[in-house]
Each structure stands twice: as structure tokens, then as C-alpha cells.
Amino acid sequence: MAVAAILLSTATALATQQLLTHELDSQLNSVIGRLRGRGPGGPGQGLLQPFGQPIGTILLATTTSGVTLDSGILLERGLRSSLSSPTVSQLSALAPSDRAQSLTVAGLGRYRVTAYKVTF
């Protein structure tokens, strides 16, 4: 009986983890879709806009030579904060991929992330 309860608990935990990961990936794909649908913002604006983006959204946009075009993390009330140098270095090292991955982002915690190429 105890073994059955342990197996059931394990199966429930795994199913919950898969469901939550799927939800995060759906949210990440929505953010990416909004970002891909716009070019650089107007004067003083960047790609990371608060409209429709969840608090805690991180963005790093670089050129192929590694020059940062825009970066930041969305805070409450549409405010944004800069990313630390270790965070920029860590995110810059990601290879473009169509698949999201879990990553502990320096100084920010655990995130689902993806990197992709875009042309303006």
C-alpha cells in the first residue's frame, strides 16, 4: 500500500511539472510572438515594452558581433531594470534554438528561456 502511494505521488508530481512547464512555454511563446511582431521602438523606447508582457520578462537583443541593442527586465507598473553584466554574458552565450530550456539566470533565479535570430 505504501509503495502504491509513493508511485502515485511521484506520477502526480511529474504530471504537474509537465503541465506547469507547458504553461510557461506557452507564455514564453506568446512573449516571443509579440517581440517578433515589432521592430525597434521609437526614440527612448526599446523592444521590451510593458504592454502584454508579464512582470519579470527578460530581454537581451544583441548584434551578431555581440553589441547589446536592448536589454532589461520588466518590473511592476511598466518599469524596467538593467541586466547585470554576468546576466548579459550568460544570456549572450545561448545558441539560437527553437526549443525553450530551463536556466538559472545569474542573480534572477530560474527561467524558461530561448534564443533566436531576428533581422530588422
Image: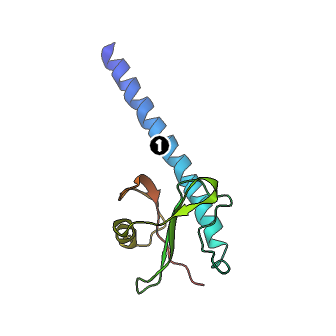
- Badge 1 marks a residue whose secondary structure is helix
Residue 34, placed above or below residue 61: above
- Please identify the residue farthest to the left as the structure is shown: 3
- Please identify the residue farthest to the bottom as the structure is shown: 65
Which residue in the protein does label 1 denote? Answer: 18
- Quadrant of the drawing holding the C terminus: bottom right
- For the point 56% across and 56% down, the residue is 75
Q: Position of residue 46 (x, y in %)?
A: 60, 74
- For the point 65% across and 66% down, the residue is 34
- For the point 55% across and 47% down, the residue is 23
Question: Is 43 situated left or right of 71 in this image?
Answer: right
Q: Amino acid at mark 1?
A: Gln
Q: How is the image coloured?
A: rainbow
Residue 118, placed above or below residue 10: below
Q: Which of 80 and 15 lies nearest the eye of the viewer?
A: 80
Q: Quadrant of residue 9?
A: top left
Question: Is 68 situated left or right of 26 in this image?
Answer: left
- Quadrant of the drawing holding the N terminus: top left
Q: Position of residue 18 (x, y in %)?
A: 47, 43
Q: Quadrant of residue 107?
A: bottom left
Question: Is 47 situated left or right of 13 in this image?
Answer: right
Looking at the rendered structure, the number of numbered marks drawn on it comes to 1
Say few, some or many: other residues with alpha carbon within 10 Å of mark 1 (under 14 / 14 to 19 / 20 or more). few
Q: Which of 92 and 32 lies nearest the eye of the viewer?
A: 92
Q: Quadrant of residue 97?
A: bottom left
- For the point 48% across and 36% down, the residue is 16
Q: Which of 80 and 2 lies nearest the eye of the viewer?
A: 80
Q: Position of residue 63 (x, y in %)?
A: 47, 84
Q: Position of residue 64 (x, y in %)?
A: 44, 85
